[in-house]
Image: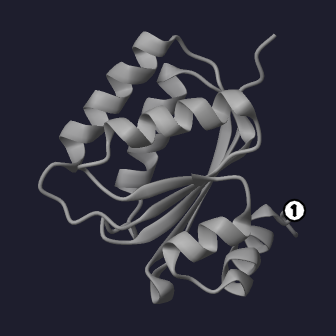
Amino acid sequence: MSENASFKIEIFEEHQFVYFQLNGDINKEELERMNQALRDHPSYQYSYDGIFDFRNGKWAMKIEDFLEENRKIKQILKGFDVGKWAVLVASPKETAYSMLWSRNLQNAYQDGVFSTTEGAATFLNRNHAFILKVINEVSAPERN
């Protein structure tokens, strides 16, 4: 059984920072939808740094589809000054896929794969307290 993927994008313009949180099974269509949503976000700038938080997500696609999407993203990013991205992961499969994604896009932008928020903060040259605040703010349940 496959859980539908969901995601949240929060952009902190004053910090030129993006937090992208993924949950559930990510198939090819979901990956395309999420990438388009980020590019269409009115506050998004390619030069912003960010975190792609995949700790509650799972890659649910064939490797061929994964690599095809990777190639598409590489084409889209050509010519842009792209910020640094840290990918947060929590399982071996997601770590392997994320490292493959990273390796294939190494000339498009700088990114790293991390299992801790401390590692991500250090890589992004951001204060760890800021990273934790961002994650907690976005992860907090909606209030009425």
**Quadrant holding the C terminus:** bottom right
Q: Which residue is drawn at 63% across and 86% down?
A: 127
Q: Tell me where residue 45 appears, x and y as whole percent.
A: 33, 68
**Quadrant holding the N terminus:** top right
Q: Which residue is drawn at 48% across and 21% down?
A: 28
Q: Which residue lies furthest to the left in this view?
A: 79
> Which quarter of the figure has residue 47?
bottom left
Task: Give the residue type that dot 1 points to.
Answer: Pro
Q: Name the residue under label 1.
A: 141
Judge whether residue 11 can be spotted in this image. Answer: no
Q: Which residue occupies the foreground of this view, 56 or 124?
A: 124
Residue 79 higher or lower than 125, as above or below: above
Q: Residue at x 29, y 63 (%)?
A: 82
Q: Residue at x 74, y 61 (%)?
A: 116
Q: Residues within 10 Å of mark 1 (few under 14, many from 20)?
A: few
Q: Tell me where residue 25 appears, x and y as whole percent.
A: 69, 26
Judge whether residue 134 can be spotted in this image. Answer: yes
> Which quarter of the figure has residue 134?
bottom right
> Which quarter of the figure has residue 73?
top left
Residue 30 higher or lower than 60, as above or below: below
**Colour treatment of the image:** one colour
Residue 113 higher or lower than 119, as above or below: above
